[in-house]
Image (tube, rainbow, N blue to C red):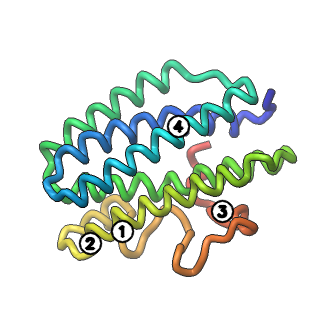
């Protein structure tokens, strides 16, 4: 059993949010016309289902129950976003996917930090790998829209884009496993 309310809440949220993301990517992949984009987005959907499976394993170890409320809520959110991808054009699904992934990076770093505060380190590698994969997703979506003329406006309104991120990880500078707990301080803390 875990005795950390923030960690329990984060596990429940991450598990259900991965479902919403996977559903959203189903619609996103179907809505794009380019074959390479379709293939990349489908792989990201698979990654999200894999993350959900990994989080469920952690929940099972520590007897953290799945939140029925979050499951229903995220089912509705995911299916709504999935359907909207057919209606809102090409740019917005890529933009909001990148924005979402940017925030997800720190969820797994925070999860690792909270486990480590309880002297639990056996999950460090999988949590690092999931945060790295979320960062790769963010980078992919950003690369698709970086030259789009709508990006500056969306960045100003939604606080993600060329100059604003929801994490401080820079893959080009390196994201080192041993230093994972030094990242994301102050990012996403309001989700506690």
Q: Position of residue 60 (x, y in %)?
A: 69, 26
**Which residue appears at 12% of the width and 43% of the height?**
87
Q: Position of residue 91 (x, y in %)?
A: 20, 59
Image quadrant for the N terminus? top right
Q: CA distance from mark 2 to mark 4?
A: 32 Å
The secondary element bearing badge 2 is classed as helix
Task: Please tell me which residue lies in front, 132 or 105.
Answer: 132
Q: Please report whichever mark, 2 or 1, sits nearer to the chain's N-terminal start.
A: 2
Q: Which residue is mark 2?
A: 152
Q: Please report whichever mark, 4 or 1, sits nearer to the chain's N-terminal start.
A: 4
Q: Is residue 171 above or below residue 187?
A: below
The secondary element bearing badge 1 is classed as loop
Q: Nearer the viewer, mark 4 or mark 3?
A: 4
Task: Please tell me which residue lies in front, 119 or 186.
Answer: 119
Circle 2 crowding by C-alpha within 10 Å: few under 14, some 14–19, many from 20: some
Q: Which residue is mark 3?
A: 185
Q: CA distance from mark 3 to mark 2?
A: 26 Å
Circle 4 crowding by C-alpha within 10 Å: few under 14, some 14–19, many from 20: some
Q: Which residue is mark 1?
A: 161
Q: Return the mark for residue 183.
A: none
Q: CA distance from mark 4 to mark 1?
A: 26 Å
Q: Position of residue 82 (x, y in %)?
A: 26, 38
Q: Which residue is mark 4?
A: 52
Q: Nearer the viewer, mark 4 or mark 1?
A: 4
Q: CA distance from mark 4 to mark 3?
A: 24 Å
Q: CA distance from mark 1 to mark 3?
A: 20 Å
Q: Is residue 151 left or right of residue 165?
A: left
Q: Please report whichever mark, 4 or 3, sits nearer to the chain's N-terminal start.
A: 4
The secondary element bearing badge 3 is classed as loop
Q: Please report whichever mark, 3 or 2, sits nearer to the chain's N-terminal start.
A: 2
């Amino acid at each position: 059993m875990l005795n950390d309310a923030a960690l329990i809440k984060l596990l429940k949220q991450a598990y259900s949010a991965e479902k919403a993301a996977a559903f959203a990517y189903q619609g996103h992949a179907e809505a794009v016309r380019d074959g390479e984009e379709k293939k990349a987005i489908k792989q990201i959907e698979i990654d999200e289902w894999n993350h959900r499976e990994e989080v469920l394993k952690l929940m099972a170890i520590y007897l953290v129950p799945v939140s029925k409320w979050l499951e229903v809520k995220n089912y509705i959110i995911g299916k709504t976003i999935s359907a909207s991808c057919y209606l809102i054009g090409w740019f917005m699904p890529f933009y909001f996917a990148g924005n979402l992934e940017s925030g997800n990076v720190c969820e797994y770093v925070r999860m690792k930090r909270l486990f480590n505060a309880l002297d639990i380190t056996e999950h460090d590698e999988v949590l690092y790998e999931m945060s790295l994969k979320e960062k790769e997703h963010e980078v992919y979506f950003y690369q698709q829209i970086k030259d789009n003329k709508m990006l500056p406006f969306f960045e100003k309104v939604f606080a993600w884009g060329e100059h604003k991120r929801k994490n401080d990880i820079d893959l080009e500078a390196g994201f080192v496993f041993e230093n994972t707990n030094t990242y994301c301080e102050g990012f996403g803390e309001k989700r506690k």
